[in-house]
Amino acid sequence: MKNPNITILKTEILSDNWYTLNKVTYTVLKKDGTTETQSREAYDRGNGAVILLYNTHSKTVILTRQFRLPTYINGNATGMLIEACAGLLDNDNPEDCIKRETEEETGYKISKVEKVFNAYMSPGSVTEILHFFIAEYSNEMKINDGGGLEEEGENIEVLEFSFEEALNMTGTGEINDAKTIMLLQHLRIKGIL
């Protein structure tokens, strides 16, 4: 159901070079009954999915490390980021997407995933909804080295950490990716690891 207090007046494409950056002009009916016109930019990169692989026997998790330009521009000296496996839906449903991304990025072929929640990650400027999953993994599920797809320019390192080490790395800043922190905390809060 659309908000009756918001009226979109105009949408202008500012850039569609990588994804789409729109400038949206709209009116909003305020609490005092007056109407105000506002303009905001919204970056549409599509929706995505993220997964944290965990092993209850070894009490470990699988994470990835790759270069992330926006972090490099904003103070991450190396630009390298440790994070949970993730990807854009690309017209797939979230479950199919995350199974595909898991195999491409980590080399693990998983068949059963558990959806835990959805979240807007940066709702002030990005339209993306991220679908969060967890799944148990074992060494028998490893079918290749992972690393991502070369044709997509991916150069991903696959990492295995003890759960406690990964959780501690969120406190030291070694892991500072929001989606990864959220999933690690989910495992702790739910008592899974």
Image (cartoon, rainbow, N blue to C red):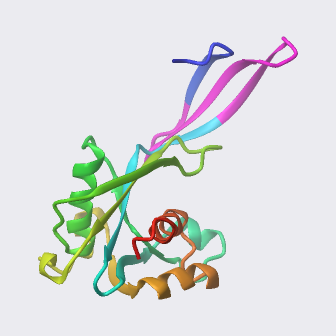
Q: In this picture, which residue range is highlighted in magenta?
A: 13-40
Looking at this view, is 139 or 56 the one in front?
Answer: 56
Residue 133 in the image: above or below residue 187: above
Question: Residue, x 55% and y 84% (percent of image)?
Answer: 169
> Is residue 122 left or right of 141 when viewed as pictured?
right
Residue 127 in the image: above or below residue 122: above
> Is residue 112 left or right of 118 when viewed as pictured?
left
Residue 119 visible, this orientation: yes
Question: Residue, x 48% and y 64% (percent of image)?
Answer: 186
Question: Residue, x 75% and y 26% (percent of image)?
Answer: 38
Asked if residue 59 is among those painted magenta in the image, a careful observer would answer: no
The quadrant where residue 156 appears = bottom left
Looking at this view, is 61 or 101 the one in front?
Answer: 61
Magenta stretch: dominant secondary structure: strand
- Where does residue 95 sit, x and y in percent of width and height? 26, 50
The quadrant where residue 61 appears = bottom left
Question: Residue, x 23% and y 74% (percent of image)?
Answer: 137
> Is residue 58 left or right of 117 when viewed as pictured?
left
- Where does residue 82 sit, x and y in percent of width and height? 46, 77
- Where does residue 188 sit, x and y in percent of width and height? 49, 72
Q: Residue lying farthest right? A: 32
- Where does residue 167 sit, x and y in percent of width and height? 52, 80
* Quadrant where the C terminus is found in the figure: bottom left
Residue 78 visible, this orientation: no
Asked if residue 20 is among those painted magenta in the image, a careful observer would answer: yes
